[in-house]
Amino acid sequence: MYQFSFEKLNVWKEAVDFTKSIYLLTNTFPESEKFGVINQLRRASVSIASNLAEGTSRNTNKDKAHFSTLAFSSLMEVLNQLIISKELNFISEENYEKLREDISKISNMLNALRKAQLNNELTN
């Protein structure tokens, strides 16, 4: 089966796995948060991988880097929502710390990708 370029990105694969973790975690949240933080967390986490996928279809490296920045912004949105969720005791310290590690890894990968994209823009 043909693979599109975004499917070959390790950071995209990590983002998809991260999204799956967010979905599983939010299944344990209070039902009253269905249209609140659950929805926000899920949408923001999906946006990380989606922006990476959309960015690969762009023609210029500058445009690709823009979508990597959007993915990073969505990742920071998820972090903010996880902090709030922890403060509201929706998630355990253990789950929070594991997700923080995932966020750190993905953020480093996104920053490296964006830097490479911008460097490619300068050399083309």
Image (tube, helix red, strand yellow):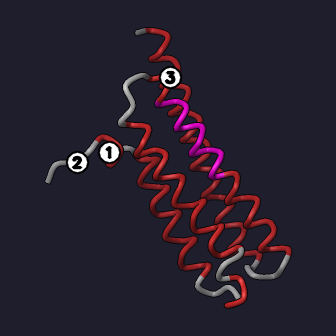
Q: Which residue is mark 2?
A: 3
Describe residue 5's horizontal placement relative to residue 111 as left or right.
left
Q: Nearer the viewer, residue 16 or 64?
A: 64
Q: Nearer the viewer, residue 122 or 63?
A: 63
> Element type at marker 3?
helix
Label 1 Cα crowd, 10 Å radius (few <14 / some 14-19 / many 20+): few
Q: Distance between the Cα atoms at labels 2 and 1?
A: 7 Å
Type of the residue with mark 2: Gln
Q: Which residue is mark 3?
A: 62
Type of the residue with mark 1: Lys
- The range drawn in magenta is 64-75
To which quarter of the image does residue 91 belong? bottom right
> Element type at marker 1?
helix
Q: Position of residue 111 (x, y in %)?
A: 59, 35
Type of the residue with mark 3: Lys
Q: Along the polypeptide, which appears first: circle 2 or circle 1?
A: 2
Residue sticking out furthest to the top: 123
Describe residue 43's horizontal placement relative to residue 77 as left or right.
left
